Image (spheres, rainbow, N blue to C red):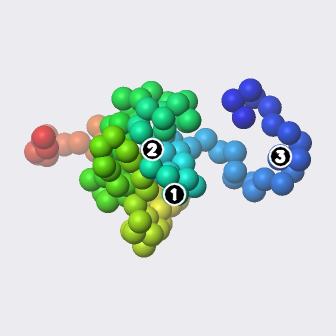
Amino acid sequence: MSSGTIDIDEFENADDDEFEERNDTERIVLFLDENDDRAWKAATIADQLELDTDAVSAILSRLKERGLVRHKRPYWAITDNKDRLQAAYRLHQHHQTADEQYGEEHFEELKTDEMEEVR
């Protein structure tokens, strides 16, 4: 799809939302889930998804903190806890639906003087 075109058969057989843009985190999780029989170096994931290696490393670290990926230096793999992965996906879908219905929240707009800064 990077060329800006796809085969008409691929177009005809695709789901309505199949070509929507995904954010980098979604793309990484989807890639690892689709390739769950392998573990990957961050640089290889970045190459496969045409992303910046440092950005992929940062995203993978956040996903590890949430228990969605496993890490044995230097390799990364999707979690083997499918229930956790499905729960995270459902939560993500709820947030996405809320954003679509009510608009995205922008933290700076919600911030008040009484709020403590979290570090």
Q: Is residue 36 left or right of residue 20?
A: left
Of residues 96 and 62, the one drawn nearer to the viewer in this rendering:
62
Q: Residue at the spot x=72%, y=34% of the render? A: 1
User: Residue 61's x, y, as percent?
Assistant: 30, 44
Q: Amino acid at mark 1?
A: Asp
- Circle 3 SS class: helix
Residue at the spot of label 1: 36
Q: With respect to residue 78, does 4 lie above or below?
A: above
* Residue 70 appears anywhere in the view: yes
Real-space Cα distance between discs 3 and 1? 26 Å
Classify the position of the C terminus by image quarter. top left
Pick whichever of labels 3 and 1 is earlier in the sequence.
3
Q: Which mark is residue 2?
A: none
Q: Amino acid at mark 2?
A: Trp
Residue at the spot of label 2: 40
Q: Amino acid at mark 3?
A: Phe
- Circle 1 SS class: loop
Q: Quadrant of residue 4?
A: top right
Real-space Cα distance between discs 1 and 2? 10 Å
User: Residue 96's x, y, as percent?
Assistant: 50, 55
**Mark 1: few, some, or many residues within 10 Å (few <14, many ≥20)?**
some
Q: With respect to residue 100, does 46 lie above or below?
A: above
C-beta proximity under 8 Å, tags 3 and 2: no
Residue at the spot of label 3: 11
User: Residue 49's x, y, as percent?
Assistant: 55, 36
Q: Residue at the spot x=86%, y=39% of the render? A: 7
Query: Closer to the observer: label 3 or label 2?
Result: 2
Real-space Cα distance between discs 3 and 2? 30 Å
**Mark 3: few, some, or many residues within 10 Å (few <14, many ≥20)?**
few
**Mark 2: few, some, or many residues within 10 Å (few <14, many ≥20)?**
some
How many numbered marks have been drawn onto this rendered protein structure?
A: 3
* Residue 109 appears anywhere in the view: no
